[in-house]
Amino acid sequence: MNPLGVPGPGEPQVRGEAKLLLSFLWIQAVGFLVYFGVSAWIAPAAWVRYGTQTAFGWGVILALAWAVRRGHVVLASACYLACGWLLLTVSAVTAGGLSGSAPIGLLVLIVAAGLLLGTRATVLTAVACVLGALGLAVASLRGALPPPSFHNTPLATFADFTVYAGLTVAFQVLAARNLKASQHRYRSLVDRARDVIFTVNREGNITSLNPAFEAVTGFPAAHWVGRPFVSLVAGDAPEETWARLQAASGPAFELPVRTTSGERVLEVAVAMTTDTSGDLLGIGRDVSERKEAETRRGQLETQLRQSQKREAIGTLASGIAHDFNNVLTAIMGHAQLLQEECPGPLQSRASEILQAGGRARDVVRQLLTFARSTGQEHRPMLLQQVATEALQLMRASLPASVALESSIDSGTAMVLADQGQMHQVVINLVTNAAAALHGRTGKVVVQLGNLPSSGGEGTPSPQGMVRLRVTDDGVGMTAEVLERIFEPFFTTRATGEGTGLGLAVVQGIVQDHGGQIYVRSVPGKGTTLDVELPAASVERLEPAEVLSEAPPGAGERLLVVDDEPVIARVVSEQLRRLGYHVTAVNDPEEALEVLAEDPDEFDLLLTDLQMPRMDGVELAARVGRLRPELPVVLSTGNRWSVSPATAKAAGIREIVDKPFRLEELAHAVRTALGPPAERPPGSRDTGS
């Protein structure tokens, strides 16, 4: 530190009260020098006394500056005041009492106490000075003071007064400058803060706002100063918010405020100001984005839970489909054999069994559909035809209290979809809407058309969307129910009246077709469900493939592999009646052994997919290494579990879905083998 107390290079900066105290000390030091020079000039004979006082003052100042530089600011301030009081008291005693300039110095000391340590220090210093002056006055009256060792001349007294006045002015200017700098720093921090900082008076009016208010709300801050705080609060209970602000206690709370673009959320902490105004000081951080992020995260978590539920149900559905489809394959196979063998009433009953089996097959496929894609083939189709047919069926099954209305645009663009699944979507949506009426009189409205586009409503657009809307005027749904309507097995109906799969199935189908489903519901007023599907990029339908009667075989030798003996037997019998020579085994390892003995023995391999120890894809791949040209047909109830690329790599030419009718199986086998003319009966592959 240099002689004037200025920090040197590398020394820590002095801030706040320390800087103020050091400034006081060096002003006081300069005052001592001025005092010594003027006094020695006026009274040269007393220069020793003046020099002693100046040296003592400089010694105290340097010691106090050393203490301040080491962080003992309060202690140094107290010592400064104590030393000043002691020096002035001694000066008064040697001057014969209060007749000299000491009282003026005591007044300056009281001012310095207030600037350095505040009001309490001012009071204590004033009490000490008053008591000291009282003691000097009493001692002077009783003659207890020693004779004065010197007498100030009027000019010396004037010099003392001038020095003390200069010190007082210097102290006040310095304090004002420090106060202004502190206020500037405070205002700079407030103006640069990204949080909204505001004050509100006891009447509830806003008294100050920082620029962040305008950045957050879009309102000019000057326009809101002086206005009631509650007029800024959004929501239905601004008075309750004002009451919470007045409490000024507890943790920060969320405060919705109005903005030019709607509404934002501030996280506000409130405290009382320390001045006498009693204003409330509030700091509000904009947490709107955080709240939106939390909402989005909640939505994502909900979607994740739905996805996990769907995955779990999908795993369950796969197992059910495998076992149940095997049972249905055996039932429907035997029923079809009976239908061919038995005339009259028995044939009719076999037909009934086949119809029931077909309905059971649809139930299994419905279960698989909601869980995940079932691999159905999507083709361009007219959704208006499907909707019209479905509504014709529904009108006969709905209660008389339900009025079914439709508005189907004949110009609706085609969609790329599975016709059976679209039929299922319409049926499920209408059934769900009718159930929402809860038995009372009401109506269900079905609308179908193109979404509005640049060409207007109803203009077909291959790049646009087709919307199917089903509306009811039923009881509607609460927010809690609305959140769960797509959950598997969730239903608001009584036990036995619904499975809870309807809307879950619809959602699975729509997502599988690349579409979206939207729901709007108002309790007591009804519900609207919108299904939006991409329009197909074609303008006319291709002729639908009509499945003809089962094509016969030409004596080809088939190897049938299925771990279920009953299925192997019934499939073998069906194929034999078509003119094929069939060998059936129940173990894929046994099938490999049979083929290894004579790879040219068979013309085609028909294998199940899910079997113990080895599935149908692996069997096909291993057979391909023995006989690359051997056609393979795969039968499965879970077509979606085998990708086309995987099937092609394993040498699988056709896939037939369990449970299958004889016509479906016969066409798959005939397609894999090729036309009979290219493969005469009894011919064998050379294996080359």
Image (cartoon, helix red, strand yellow):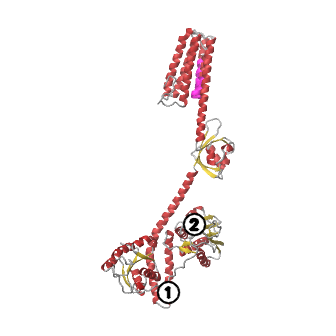
Report helix, strand or loop for mark 2: strand
Give the side of residue 328 with respect to residue 419, left or right: left
Relative to 37, residue 598 above or below = below
Q: Which residues are magenta?
A: 109-133
Relative to 648, residue 168 above or below = above
Relative to 332, residue 311 above or below = above
Residue type at mark 1 is Arg
* Residue density around tag 1, few if under 14, some if 14–19, many if 20 or more, within 10 Å: some
Count of residue discs:
2
* Residue density around tag 2, few if under 14, some if 14–19, many if 20 or more, within 10 Å: some
Residue 608 percent across, percent down from the top left: 40, 76
Residue bearing mark 2 = 517
> Which of 180/488 is in front?
180
Residue 599 percent across, percent down from the top left: 33, 79
Report helix, strand or loop for mark 1: helix
Q: Are marks 2 and 1 in contact (CB under 8 Å)?
A: no
Residue 23: name its quadrant. Answer: top right
At a point 50% along the width and 61% down the height, the residue shown is 304
Q: Main secondary structure of the magenta part?
A: helix
Res. 496 visible in picture: no
At a point 64% along the width and 70% down the height, the residue shown is 458
Residue 125: within the magenta?
A: yes
Residue 91 percent across, percent down from the top left: 56, 15
Quadrant containing the C terminus in the rendered view: bottom left
Res. 560 visible in picture: yes
Label 2 to label 1: alpha-carbon separation = 42 Å
Give the side of residue 594 with respect to residue 129, left or right: left
Upstream in sequence: badge 2 or badge 1: 1
> Which of 676/357 is in front?
676
- Which mark, by number, is residue 349? 1
Residue type at mark 2 is Ile
